[in-house]
Image (cartoon, coloured by chain):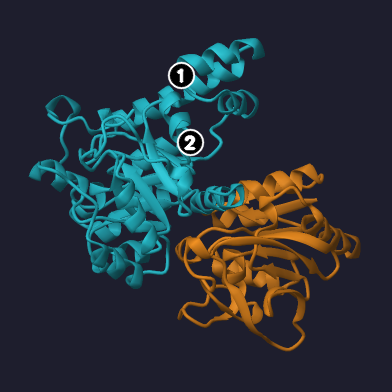
Chain colours: A orange, B cyan
Amino acid sequence: MKIGILAVQGAFIEHQKKLESLGAQCVEIRQKSDLERVSDGLVLPGGESTVQGKLLRELDMLGDLRSRIEGGLPVLATCAGLILLAKEISNDDHVYLGTLPVTVERNAYGRQLGSFRTVREMEYVGQVPMVFIRAPYIKTVGKDVEVLAEVDGRIVAVRYGKQYAMSFHPELNEDSKIHEMFLKECRREQQIF
Amino acid sequence: MAAERYDLNKQLAQMLKGGVIMDVTTPEQAKIAEGAGACAVMALERIPADIRAAGGVSRMSDPKMIKGIQEAVSIPVMAKCRIGHFVEAQILEAIEIDYIDESEVLSPADDVYHIDKRRFKVPFVCGAKDLGEALRRISEGASMIRTKGEPGTGDVVQAVRHMRRMNSEIGKVVSMRSDELFEEAKDMRVPYDLIEYVHVNGRLPVVNFAAGGVATPADAAMMMQLGAEGVFVGSGIFRSGDPEKRAAAIVKAVTNYQDSKVLAEISEDLGEAMVGINEQEIELLMAERGK
């Protein structure tokens, strides 16, 4: 199993450690040519979405990533990754990959003083710890988007086909349930081919 | 500060990894930095090169100026307070700054004590020349470390020296027998549990950036190859011929720091780099402030 982790900026090593501890092989994606080595799944990590988005555009990776995702490559997107996937950002004119029909709000909880953590129920995985760092949340979802978790009435995790996106950071604690769920999705994909 | 808040503050630094934090003095510069791919900006009245040239006492920036920058960009905004000046830090916390840099670039307000950073909710980044300094700052509550380097010089030699020294000291602690760690903690004047953390994990317990004298994409990539997890660039950008282009190139250099072909490409046509001052020509060593 080979999972690609977008490694242009942000907390990608945390995802890598977690996936490797679950037995997956990881490939760091820093430029277009790295994408060819990705076969089973893709992780879009946390970081600064403006930086990641700009680098994706300048390194000419947006088109290839988009077509791989639309072609059914399973994706796990966290925080900045969710913003990269979103079809619309309510307080920003940019759209990056635009493969996930949701509207997100950036820095929706304010500055660093608004960062927090909590434990909540999430569809398919049960109770999970959730770390929110200058996090976005999802304001509206399009057709066929399944809401997986809410915190205080705000949508914080969704699924759309094989795209799993959340506004918090499952890579920043000891709990592995979300990564296990994602690898299961990637494995399902493997059996079909 | 509650343990939970400290974790969240260390985690914000994790999100900045692989990124470039740029010094800016106006909302316009902040927008240029954000557009060029900065992962955060440091709001200050004068860049270190100008502080150096102007001399005199250098203090925290006007909160109004910092607020202007907070409104101009969506990325995290940091600001500097003087070493030991806990009231400047309180003011920065009141305007909800994302990170405070207790910085040797400004004139120290206290020649003995650093700020007790554990009393604050907002995170702190501090400079360090070696492992002992880094761990002392962490025990005071810093949730991110950077090399001191020598700010405002455009000369990377001291950032290199500080990063190498920190790495070799970490290597030494890793290779020690566990019964030697107690004496090492005493020698370094740091708490035992932090030395033990370094011994077990082979790294600092917080994110470690390079700072002080980075002026080119090659400088930035070199610091990354030496083990920095990201880079601060101060005077190097807005003191150069084409700030926007240089800033964007440094951002790309930090992402692809191991790819010499990419580095060659982005190093082309950047215009004039900041002139800089050599180590031997400096009268004021800011890195000697606050140990």
Residue A119 rendering spot, x and y as whole percentages: 74, 62
Residue B32 rendering spot, x and y as whole percentages: 30, 65
Q: Quadrant of the C terminus of chain A?
A: bottom right
Query: Which quarter of the figure has residue B261?
Result: top left
At label 2, which amino acid type do we have?
A: Ile
The residue shown at (30%, 29%) is B112
In the image, residue B276 above or below residue B35: above
In the image, residue A117 above or below residue B285: below
- As rendered, which of B170 and A112 lies closer to the eye? A112
Mark nearer the N terminus (1 vs 2): 2
Chain on which label 1 sits: B
- Judge from the rendering whether residue A110 lies leftward or rightward of residue B90; answer left or right: right
- As rendered, which of B107 and B214 lies closer to the eye? B107
Chain on which label 2 sits: B
Please tell me the numbered disc located at residue B200: none
**Is mark 1 in CB contact (under 8 Å) with mark 2?**
no
The residue shown at (68%, 68%) is A166
At label 1, which amino acid type do we have?
A: Met
Please tell me the numbered disc located at residue B188: 1
Label 2 secondary element: helix
Query: Which quarter of the figure has residue B196?
Result: top right
The residue shown at (24%, 65%) is B65
In the image, residue A180 above or below residue B163: below
